[in-house]
Amino acid sequence: MILDTTPFMADEEPIASSSSNPPPTSSESFNTFFENWLREQNSHLEELVTAANNHNNNNNNENDAVLLQLIEKVVRQYEQYYRTKSDWEKRDAIAMYTPSWLSNLEDAFLWIGGWRPTLAIHLLYSKLGIQVDAKLDDLIRGIATGDLSDLAPKQMEKIDELHRKIIHEERVLTEKLAKVQETAADRSMVELSIAVSEMMRSGGSDGGESEERVEEVLEVKCGEMEELLHMADHLRLETLKAVIEILTPIQAVHFLIAKAELYLRLHEWGKKRGTIGKGVNWSCMSGCARVAGNPVFKF
């Protein structure tokens, strides 16, 4: 499946903003963008669910064209998210490592300011297993199911190859992050901490010279952290697009449904845990739609 989604494609350089709009001026402004983005994602989820329910295996050519348009729209929304996030990272990269717009539950699963790219593969395998179990009788009789349980051996080979590639790239970035984190105790940081501590004990002042040195040293480290965020976000988006390229349109729709459901529900669960602790009612909290008999929670 070929996606017509620009500006970001899998073989491009790590995400950097090309927008002429200025970056957000506060965390509240990105928080507002994020909440609006979630509402739009929930709207797209409902469109995906409707498309999956209306899919007709006897008229695939016509349906595939409609599905492709929807898939491209959803992918463009992810591009918009990473483009805006890139703008914000340029202004305050450190804040993106502990985003205030996410819950503590979501924070626990973060890797360099977001989800691990390999989670897209794990999500695909989990959804595949669920759908295979649900359609096992049809599969045994050789009946096409019109979902991820129809994955062909060639597709599985490509997914496995992609998985190994992403694991390697994740490890490279994890090692880069470790090296940057280790610089918290490098010679420049220790020298500064000693000098400033001694000055504080003596009650003296250097006319702001130490503050300038601290800012210079930290600016370099913040720059390295920002670069890692751009690289990690690029890998996240690259992985999403690579998975979709392997799938048929209807399979991609089911994958995007699972991705949106997991993201939205984890965000909702985290917010509820933050307010009422463990006394959460895990049943349909806000009503639900259904895909082929399975509940799809909605806000």
Image (cartoon, rainbow, N blue to C red):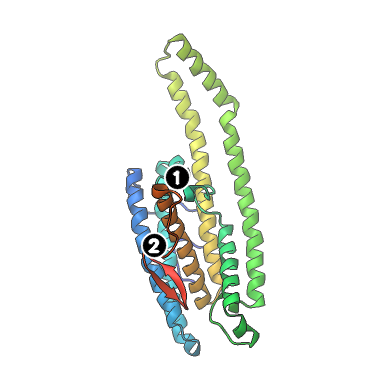
- Secondary structure at badge 2 equals loop
Q: Which residue is at the front of the view, 130 or 40?
A: 130
Q: Earlier in the sequence, mark 1 or mark 2?
A: 1
In the picture, measured across the screen, residue 142 lies left or right of residue 195, that is: right
Percent coordinates x, y for residue 273 in the rendering: 43, 50
Q: Which residue is at the front of the view, 235 or 120?
A: 120
**For mark 1, what is the residue?**
96
Vertical side of 57 occupied by 233: above or below: above
In the picture, measured across the screen, residue 36 lies left or right of residue 258, that is: left
Q: Is residue 296 visible?
A: yes
Measured in 3D between alpha carbons, the distance from the residue under mark 1 to the one under mark 2, in whole angstroms, is 29 Å
For label 1, count other residues whose C-alpha is less than 10 Å away and answer few (under 14), some (14-19) or many (20+). many
As shown in the figure, which amino acid type bears the numbered disc 1?
Answer: Met
Residue 285 falls in image quadrant? bottom left
- Secondary structure at badge 1 equals helix
Q: Is residue 82 visible?
A: no
Furthest residue toward bottom = 58
**For mark 2, what is the residue?**
285
Is label 1 or label 2 in front?
2
Percent coordinates x, y for residue 154 in the rendering: 66, 75
Percent coordinates x, y for residue 49 in the rendering: 42, 74
In the picture, measured across the screen, residue 43 lies left or right of residue 110, that is: left
Q: Which residue is at the front of the view, 31 or 161?
A: 31
Residue 133 falls in image quadrant? bottom right
Percent coordinates x, y for residue 163 in the rendering: 63, 62
Q: Residue at x 43, y 10 (%)?
A: 203
As shown in the figure, which amino acid type bears the numbered disc 2?
Answer: Met
For label 2, count other residues whose C-alpha is less than 10 Å away and answer few (under 14), some (14-19) or many (20+). few
Q: Residue at x 63, y 68 (%)?
A: 159
